[in-house]
Every structure is written in structure tokens, then in C-alpha cells.
Image: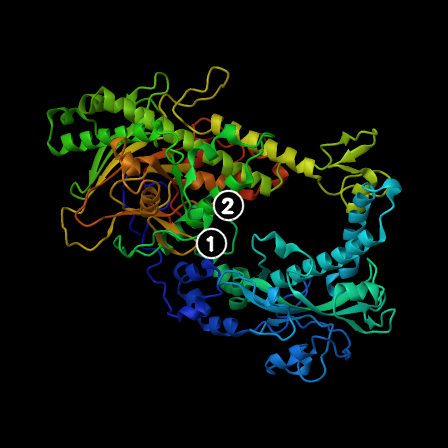
Amino acid sequence: MLWQQYFCYGGAERGQFYSDVVEVKLKDSDWRILDNKAISTMRRLETYIAVAFALCLHHLLAMSVDSFSPPSLTLLQPIDRWPAIVRRPSSMAAAKDSYDDDYDDESGMLNGPETKIGGNWMKKSPDVIAGIPTEITEKKTDDATVYMDVGIGGKEFGTGPLSKRMYDVMMTVASRQFPGGKIPPDIRRLYLIYSMDASAKEAVKAAMINNGYEMNLGDDMAMQDVGAWGSVESVLLLDPITGNPIEGEDGSISYDSWQDAITAGGWEPGDGFSFVIRKVPSLQKSLELSSILNALDPDGKLREEAKAKGMLLPDEDVASLRDLCVDCFQRVNAAPVEALGEEKVFRGGSSKGYNVISREDLLRENRNLDKTEKVKTLMHVMDALANHGCLIVDLTNEDKYLDDAITISKMWGAVEIFFKKLLEKDSSIKDLPAMGVAEGVGSSHAMVGYASFKDGDNQFLETRLRRSDGAFLPEEARAIMGDDAVDSMVDSFRIMADVGKDIVRIVTAAASIEAEAFLTVGSVVSEDKEGSPSIAGLLFAEASASGIWGDDGKQTPKQPSENDRVRGGVLASDAAVLMTEEILDDGKPLGESFDRNEGPVSMSPHRICRYSNDGQSKAKPSEVFGAHTDTSFVTIVPAAAVSGLEIFDEDTLQWYRAELYARKHAKGLDPAGDMDEHFPWHSRYLIVMPGELLQITSRNNVPAAVHRVVTANEAIRFSAPVLLRARPGAKMDIERYMGSTEKADSLLMQCNGMKMEEIHDALQENPRGAQGSNS
């Protein structure tokens, strides 16, 4: 194992642990429906798993989706079918002729002159189906949309009870809108149709999810309307006891629409029904990685062997600090070593997570008025960090506020001054201390000073702030840079630390909301105008009908109200704010009210770096700072003039050079370069990457970013990242910062009560027993 002794390596670094992995080449088409993690499994698992994976892959991918199971069954289990019946010809009968006849009668598909209805099945829709309205066949969606025809058995999917529940809630609320609670017949009929359609839609959603698909209705609200999400072909009413198809009130067996089933067949909410629906827009989901691995290893022997070797399989939870070390280590080694030039490297995609976010969107004061996080911002941040490993922040808010960008541009001037004097061997350089632990800090992770590696190709100055007076360390740097340059370094640190704290707040709050860690059912109870107790705007009777409030006479809450969720969101955000103020180390003292040893020097370094490839203009692009993860909450990197920072994109499984995306964004904002007189284009952007500590507080929703630095031919790259870490004496208090311990995962519980310095130490452990690096 080759561990590079770079002081600035955070958690896991690239090594040679997986040198014996066999890569098995498959056609591009073979990978299309695999989860991204399944693809990286080929790199992450050792030979015995990789080979087994490849041998079984063809069989797994060859499985068709001609029939499927309801949620209580698995994909490979046989399904019970309703007794076959022959429906009478309908206006959709011509649709049969447009299907191919690859399926026999036992498959439940349309086939031949008689169609068996009632079994659960799914197949891809043909390009043209006679009789289906053009608004269905000509839907405009993205290229990934697949149209599916679905047959649902009402007994398995509970269409009767589901429709009754939906209808009762709608009617209870609607009765308040009419005098005496008398709802007009036409309105009631609309509610009947809606409850039938909505129940069918939920059943189709459940069936698709269970079988590798998901309904894709996009952002168009019109697609949510009755009948807009698919074309109903056949509806069967079911016997409430046997679940078998029965005749409707008019003697018919099958109906062509929800309305016909209601008006002619006499369907009422609570009656079960089976149905066939055509042209449902969907997306093909990737195969579950757990299912793939279980198919490869049914007796668990390979899993046991992997565990004995200290490996963490891709479908296993990160349950401890050691698991986190292993997870980061394996992901680092899964990333490819080969480097590409700017013309070929990945520059970002169309996902919203790649988009640049404005600084003002992240501010605590710009939360919703009720102090919950804005959903749009929260989703953007989580998408970017969880799927792509970084978030690009525009400090100018699209040129509305220039001060921070101007400060960052001054910082770049300070960086250039330092390295210029270093190369000129200015006499003041001789007083610069070598890299070492800051005096009196008491933490081996608080390094300060200068270091050089690779014959001077990589040069670093590790700076920190003294907590008591905000002094810039090492103090000798002031004589080299000058007062103005040092002041700009301090100011830029403050800007970057504040951005990092806001992002940590949003991610931690989002994870707590997702885990319902602050959610207390029945916590918000109010009185309506008449004095009747209510929850979420519904009277207790209405809440009982909807399932929110118990109907056992004791009024025991069953499900959280909307107000409960709002309160949980407020508490989650406020607790995350508390954590960022008390644990994240921004170099400021906490004050006398906090009795904890936080150390005299900030644990969060501001590092200035110079990378080169010894002036070899024809050299092939290569790593100059190997792949690794950082033991930080977030690492904030100001975008540089010369690109070179690469983040391994978990979504596309390739190296992503975010600075090139930022460059494109800047060109779009200022195509003529009018802002150049104020600051260089790159000074407006910060690239924020999640670290190992954020992986903990995000409950493993956001993995620590695997990143590296690549040379850009003869160009020299300067960099000035801030690694936002934790106050060493602060303790991780789960209930204070992340809610109920009952909702905490095992990793959080292991950290509960630990000092952050102890957590930091544990994350430096080499999962293979080799000597770790000093971070």
C-alpha cells in the first residue's frame, strides 16, 4: 500500500489495495439499466466478486418485464392471477392488432381474439395504438421516457380500501363548502371519478416502483388530471369477498372508462376494481444493487469473505467510523487514475445539481418566513453534493453584489505575491517556518507553515487564525505578503467559512427532516373559529377519516399533520444552525458561556497552493495531487484561473472539472467581459465539496467527495482552499443538533458524546493497517 505523506491529505488517499481487481469489459448497452454504484462495483470489488458479477450479468440483464408482482412479492416470484374471463368488444378492440404476438395467453398480455383481464402485467407500449387520443400518443417528454401498458389486479393492490379512504377525505372536506353539508350530485360524481382515478394511479405507481420503473409525469400539472396520465382501456368490478370479476349493474363485465364503471356499472368507493391502462409515461429505474449482489451470492459466502478482508460492499450501510474510513478508501480507489485535458474532460451535465447557486439563496436569513429551509434551495444543494460531489456558488448573485468577489480577487493577488517571492528566493522567505503543528494547540491536526513536494512542483503554505485576536499564522507570512495582502487573506477566509457554514446547515437540516428526527405527531393542535379542536385545518372527525387522527375514541394521533411537519422542519433547521455555530470552527471564539477546550488556533486551515508539471508543455495531463477525501465538513475552493480541480461525479462515474462549468456560467453572465475591471471572472465562484464529517451529519446521504488535482500542461495552477473543520473540544450531541436518538443511525450513535478531535483521529485510521497521513 502506497500512502503519500502529504500533510494536506484528509481521509482516504489513493493506494494500491485493489491492484488485483479484474475489469471485465461489457458492451455499453449492457450497462444501461444498472445503478451507478453497480458500475463502480466492477472497480471496487476484488477478483472473486468481479468475475462472478460479470458471469451473472448477462442473465440478469436478459430478464424481461413481461409480468410483474405487487409490492408484497418479489420480481422473480410467480404471481397469482385472477380467473380468466373474456370481455366483450369495446371501442379499444382494434388496439390488439397493433401489438406483436410474442406472448402466450398465460402471460396475461393482449394476444389473439380473446384477452384475459385481471392479472398483473406490464409491457412496453407500441408506437401507435389505434383509438387512443392524440393527446396521449403525442405527449412530449424527455428522451428517457418509456410508455408502458399496465394491467392491475385490484385485490393485490387494494384498490377498494384505497379508493374509500381517498373519497371519504374529499367528501368530508367538501361538505364544509356547501350549506348543510349537502353536496350537489354532479360534484359528488366528479369526486367519484377522481377517487377512482387517483386510486388507480397509486396502484400503477406502486407496481412500477416494485418492478424497476417509475411514473414520469414531469412538471406539467395538466398531466396530473383525471385520465391525462394514461388511457383507460378496461375496468373490471370485483366481488368484495372472492376478489373475482363480477357483472356491473347493467350486466356488463368490462367498462371502457372510470365514468362508465361508475354510471353504468354502479361502482362505489370501497369496491375493488381491476383495470388495464395504456401509454403510461415512465422511466426505467436501475436494478437494485442489493438484488444483484444477492443473486451473485445467494448463500452469503462472498459477503463473509469480503467482511473478513475488511471490505464494505456497495449495498452495505456505513455503520461506524471504521466503515466510513473503508467507504472513502474504496471510493478513492474506484476512481480512475487516467487524466484528460480540458478539451475532453467532463464539464457538467443538464441536471439542476450542476447549476450555479446564488450566495443569497444559502443565507440563513433567507429561509422561509416560518424558519423552515426553502425546498428549492434544499433540493439543489442536496442534488449537487450527493450526486455530483460539489456545489458551485456565485458570490455576486449574478452581479448584484460585488464586494465578496472583489475580496477574493485581492486574495488571489496575495497568493501570487507569496509564490513570486518564493520563486525569487526573497530574503524574507528564509524566516518562514517549515510545516509543523501550531505551537500550544494540542492537536496534531492543526498544522502551520510551508512545505514543498515533488521537487518543488507542489508547494503549500498552511495558514490559520489565532482565535483570541484573529492574527494570521504563521506570523512570518505578513513580512512576505504585506499587511494588505494578509488582511485580504483573513477576509476571504471569513467569506468562505460563512458560505460553508450555511451549506452544512442546509444539508444537516435536510437529513434530519428526511429522518423525521424532530417530528412529533400531534405536536401542533389549534382551535378553529367555532372552538372545535383541529389538526392541519381539519376537524378531528375529518382527521380521523383521513387517518391523521385515531378513531378509537381516544384521539391518539396516527399520522403527522402538515403543521407537525412544519414544526419538525423549523426545529431541524434551528438545530443545524446551533451545530454550525458551536461545532464548526470559523476561527472565532465561542465566548465565556461555553466551557470547552477549543484551542487557541482555528482547526480550519486556509491553504494556498502552487501546482506545476516542471514546465513540460508536451506532458500528458496527470495527477499532481492524488485522489482523496477530506476530513472536514466542507472544503471550499475558490475557482481558479487555471482549471485542474477534479471531483469524481457519483452520478456519471467520471471526473468532473467544475471550474470549466463555472467559466461557462461566467461567460453567459458577462459575454463582453465588462466586469473584468472589477475582478477576474473566476473570483465570483466558490466550489464547495462535502467532507467526511458532513457524511456523518448528513446520515450518509452526502458522501465525502473524492477529488484530486490534475496538471494543465505547462500552465501553473494556484489554489486557495479552506477546509472547514470542527472545534476540537466540542462534543457531538445528537439530541441537541440532530434530534431524536431513536431516529439516529448507528454511525451517529457511535459519534454521540465524542469530542470532535476524537472523531477526527478515528477518521485518520488506515482501514488496511498502513500508516495514515497527517491531515
**Residue named by callout 1:** 312
**Residue named by callout 2:** 700
Q: Position of residue 209 (x, y in %)?
A: 61, 60
Residue 205 in view here = yes
Alpha-carbon distance for marks 1 and 2?
14 Å
Q: In which quarter of the image is residue 761?
A: top left
Using the image, determine if residue 458 lies above or below residue 589. Answer: below
> In the picture, which quadrant includes the C terminus?
top left
Q: Residues within 10 Å of mark 2 (few under 14, many from 20)?
A: many
Residue 579 in view here = no
Kindly identify the residue that appears in the image at 24 percent across and 21 percent down: 484
For this view, does 453 lie left or right of residue 535? left
Residue type, mark 2 in image = Asn
Kindly identify the residue that appears in the image at 81 percent across and 32 percent down: 533
- Mark 1 or 2 closer to N-term? 1
- Near-viewer residue (1 or 494): 494
Q: Position of residue 341 (x, y in %)?
A: 25, 54
Label 1 element class: loop
Q: Where is residue 622 in the image (x, y as percent from the top left)?
A: 24, 52
